[in-house]
Image: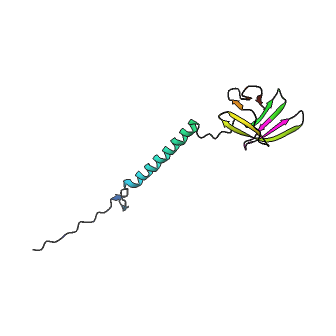
């Protein structure tokens, strides 16, 4: 006798019943793959945010402007120095009505040089964040922020 070979019955998606008693369209149970994908993407996003915050807190990435940017007065010598964000500097003597252009360089944390148009460097200038002052290393000149 020949046995009949039965193919397995097809698996049908679950049927969801409408509250009115009508059968709704087929609904399949979502697989875990898309959900896992979003969890991985969210985890990577959170990791990137944590790394950026850590870099900002540690001071590696500092988006604040340099503290010397602005105008500084030297009351004892009656002249002003304007430090611009683009690295240029202008020395002015209001009493004499003269000015000179140059640039400024950050040498180290809170340490700067003024450089003349001819390339001559000034003595080292040190920024004091507590007093918000700028001075030469030997304190022979003290700059006070204007305004």
Horizontal side of residue 43 vs 115, given as left or right: left
Residue 94 located within the stretch drawn in magenta: yes
Residue extending furthest right? 96
- Name the quarter where the N terminus is drawn: bottom left
Kindly indicate the quadrant of the structure image that contains residue 111.
top right
In front: 128, or 2? 128
Q: Nearer the viewer, residue 136 or 81?
A: 136
Give left or right: position of 47 versus 134: left
Residue 115, image x, y percentages: 76, 39
The answer to whether 143 is drawn above or below residue 48 in the figure is above
Q: Nearer the viewer, residue 122 or 20?
A: 122
Seen as rendered, the residue at the extreme bottom is 1
- Tell me where residue 99 sits by quadrant: top right
- Which quadrant, please, contains the C terminus? top right
Query: Residue sitting at 35 percent across and 58 percent down?
Result: 16
Report whether 38 appears left or right of 136.
Answer: left
Query: What span is colored magenta in the figure?
Result: 81-95
Q: Residue at x 55, y 40 (%)?
A: 55
Magenta includes 118?
no
- Residue extending furthest toward the left: 1
Residue 23 percent coordinates (x, y): 35, 61
Position of residue 115 relative to residue 137, above or below, is: below
- Residue under the image location 37 percent in, 53 percent down: 32
> Total of numbered circles in the picture?
0
Residue 117 screen position, x and y as percent = 79, 43
Secondary structure, magenta segment, majority class: strand
Could you tell me residue 142's position as x and y percent? 76, 27
């Amino acid at each position: 006798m020949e046995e009949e070979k039965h193919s397995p019955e097809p698996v049908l998606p679950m049927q969801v019943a409408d509250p009115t008693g009508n059968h709704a369209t087929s609904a399949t149970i979502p697989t875990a793959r898309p959900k896992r994908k979003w969890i991985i993407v969210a985890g990577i996003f959170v990791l990137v945010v944590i790394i950026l915050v850590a870099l900002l807190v540690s001071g590696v990435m500092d988006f604040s402007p340099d503290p010397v940017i602005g105008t500084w007065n030297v009351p004892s010598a009656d002249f002003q120095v304007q430090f611009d964000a683009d690295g240029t500097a202008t020395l002015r003597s209001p009493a004499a009505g003269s000015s000179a252009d140059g640039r400024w360089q950050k040498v180290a944390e809170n340490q700067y040089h003024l450089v003349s148009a001819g390339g001559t460097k000034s003595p080292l200038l040190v920024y004091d964040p507590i007093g918000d002052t700028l001075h030469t290393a030997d304190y022979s000149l003290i700059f006070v922020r204007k305004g």
